Amino acid sequence: MEEKHLASGSDATEKLYYHDSHSREFTATVLSSEEKVTAKGKKEGYRVVLDRTLFFPEGGGQFGDQGWIDGIKVTDTHEKNGVIYHETEAPIAVGAEVKGELDYKERFSRMQQHTGEHMLSGIIHRLYGYDNVGFHLGAAETTMDFNGELTSEQVREVETLANQAVWDNIPVEILYPTKEELASMDYRSKIEIEGQVRIVRIGDVDMCACCAPHVDATGQIGLIKLIGAIKYKGGMRVSMVCGFRALLDYNQKEASVVTISRKLSAKPDSIAEAVDRLQKEVEAQKEKIRILQEQYLKGVLKEIKPEDTCVLLFEETLDTVAVRNFVNDVMRITDGICGAFIGTDAEGYRYILGSSKKEITNISKEMNQTLNGRGGGRSPMVQGSVKAKQSEIEAFLKAQS
């Protein structure tokens, strides 16, 4: 299999990243430098074309490389018809001999993620026959969409096998097969491509058509960690971090665990049990509060008489079920308007209104219109919210009674 570099046509940019994906600097000649202007006339920097470049352009679910050309920031990189365009913050003289420098830390991180994605996809395809139907290498994590579902046990199995392949330090090979050789190869991402097909082979873990830079061997990935797996469009969306990103993810979660363990006065490996205990304590306190609220409302009910035409209760906090029961109980005592308003003058009130005789739906609508409220329901009970003061609400409803 002859080595090639996938340049096509005399105007195509020479792609140095296919010579060595770990190169960081290069020299080139500026072929063009144009100001980038949107259809609405907005200026958005410059587009620079070089005769050759180390900058990998956006494509295949991966962002374009960033870096510098003669110290000028390259913010993004795109390719069209074999020509690579460097988005820069300033113009560069046409014909100038320039020095390009990659943001190699980010490039290497993306290579870790991309090779890790190949390994995960290859293992899932081999074990379960699922295809990777969507891939996005984001700024914080990588997502992969598969056309089949995985159990949590299967997700952990795949993660373990992928990391075993990392520890085996398998060489990552780049192949340029002939059409005849390609026809007999069993590889992923088989689509019709004009010209040379580039194959990335990782031992017996994966073989896939791909145009992106990769690490030289799986050991350079360091660690593959799956941080999410959810059902998505009849299949599975798996989220992953590799290498430096996996270390950052671990450090962030470790810091959270340490903070939580201190707040709960529990050892880091015992915080789940501590949270369970705290939840039980909270539920017990809620039950005590519910009983106290019930006793309080029973006391309020004792003061209500059948001849009362407007019974209104205002409190900052009360359980919704207790409030509804209170309104029902008041409706059994009096035919007038009864209501409970939970909140404050500053924040507004949630309310439940009821009446066994009056058309409470119409009264509620008029109150909402008058006092900046909203809500609804059917007689004999309605609910909603209102942004008004207690005195305004009392005055309005007493006038209706």
Image: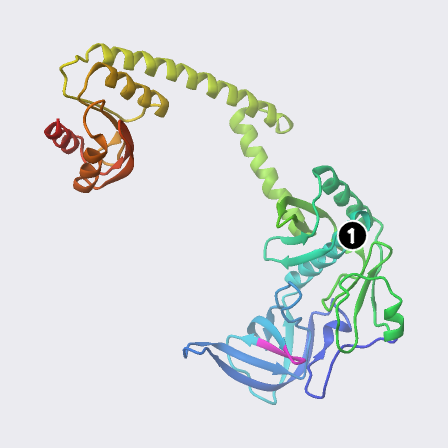
**259 or 388, nearer to the observer:** 388
Indicate yes or no whether the magenta region holds residue 365.
Answer: no
In screen coordinates, is 206 left or right of 86?
right
Q: What stretch is highlighted in magenta?
A: 80-86
Instruction: Please identify the dominant SS of the magenta region.
Output: strand
Instruction: Give the answer, above or below, for where 50 lies relative to 162.
Output: below
Q: Quadrant of the C terminus?
A: top left
Task: State which quadrant residue 323 falls in.
Answer: top left
Disc 1 target residue: 125
The residue drawn where x is 55% and y is 83% is 92
For badge 1, the amino acid type reads: His
Identify the residue at image location x=29%, y=13%: 296
The coloring applied to the image is: rainbow
**Secondary element type, mark 1:** helix
In which quadrant is the N terminus drawn?
A: bottom right
Q: Which residue is drawn at 51% across and 79% down?
A: 46
Q: Can you tell which quarter of the image residue 350 is in?
A: top left
In the picture as drawn, the residue positioned furthest to the left comes out as 399
Task: Indicate whether 95 appears above or below 102.
Answer: below
- Residue 387's spot in the image, x, y percent? 23, 38
Which of 282 and 332 lies nearest the eye of the viewer? 332
The quadrant holding residue 25 is: bottom right
Name the spot of residue 353 as percent of width and height, x first: 25, 28
> From where the camera sits, is residue 1 visible?
no
> Position of 220 compared to 262: left or right?
right
| Left or right of residue 287: residue 371 | left
Horizontal and vertical percent for residue 16? 73, 75
Closest to the observer: 206 or 192? 192
